[in-house]
Amino acid sequence: MKVDKHLFRALAQLWNLAYSCFTFGKVDLVPTIEDYMALLRCSKFHVDRAYSKAVNVPTFLKKLMHITGMNEQWVAARIKQKGDSKCIPCKSLKDLILAHLDTKKRVDVFPLSIYGLVVFPKALGHVDKVVTDLFDWLDKRVTPIIRYKTR
């Protein structure tokens, strides 16, 4: 096999040992999970692993039902549309924290409220759907480093 010395030298200079990838300027050419799946001809991926996108994701309604322990009617009546996403008013969560009979569910709803208001605020006075996604991942012990494809 004949090796092109110039090409080999160029590739060697562009190889980034620290990240095990080629670096062109400030751009790292690191294969994505989808690239590896194509290279390995692996059409299936594991839902419960980091960097995978779940196929059957529960709806916002189902996630809220699970977190709060409330029935579908209670949750559906409180879901609001704010801009481009669905939310639940913090007042509803506060009332639930004060009145819920199940102490474990109170403890689950409290950090949901804090994350929704302080850490990931999107709509003033409302907890966004994205926060329930985080809680759903943590509950399933899935690393929440999910790579979403742009639409």
Image (spheres, helix red, strand yellow):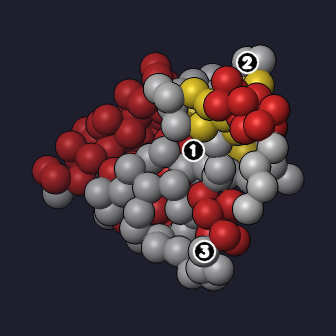
Percent x, y of residue 128:
59, 40
- Residue 2 in sight: yes
Residue at 72% from the left image edge and 30% from the top image edge: 9
In the image, residue 48 above or below residue 129: below
Q: Please state which of residues 87 and 94 is positioned toward the viewer in this rendering.
A: 87
- Residue 139 in sight: no
Pointer 2: what residue?
A: 26
Q: Can you name the residue that lies furthest to the right here? A: 151
Q: Is residue 101 left or right of residue 124?
A: left
Percent x, y of residue 68:
35, 56
Three-letter amino acid code of the residue under disc 3: Leu
Q: CA distance from mark 3 to mark 2?
A: 28 Å
Q: Please state which of residues 18 and 86 is positioned toward the viewer in this rendering.
A: 18
How many numbered marks, from 0 up? 3
Three-letter amino acid code of the residue under disc 2: Lys
Q: Is residue 52 left or right of residue 27?
A: left
Q: Secondary structure at mark 3?
A: loop
Disc nearer the start of the sequence (3/2): 2
Percent x, y of residue 137:
40, 55
Residue 130 is tagged as 1
Disc nearer the start of the sequence (1/2): 2
Residue 40 is tagged as 3
Q: CA distance from mark 3 to mark 1?
A: 32 Å
Q: Please state which of residues 101 and 128 is positioned toward the viewer in this rendering.
A: 128
Residue at 85% from the left image edge and 53% from the top image edge: 151
Residue at 80% from the left image edge and 49% from the top image edge: 150
Residue 89 figure quarter: top right
Three-letter amino acid code of the residue under disc 1: Val
The quarter of the picture where the N terminus appears is bottom right
Q: Residues within 10 Å of mark 2 (few under 14, many from 20)?
A: few
Residue contact between numbered discs 3 and 1, judged by CB atoms under 8 Å? no
Percent x, y of residue 17:
50, 29
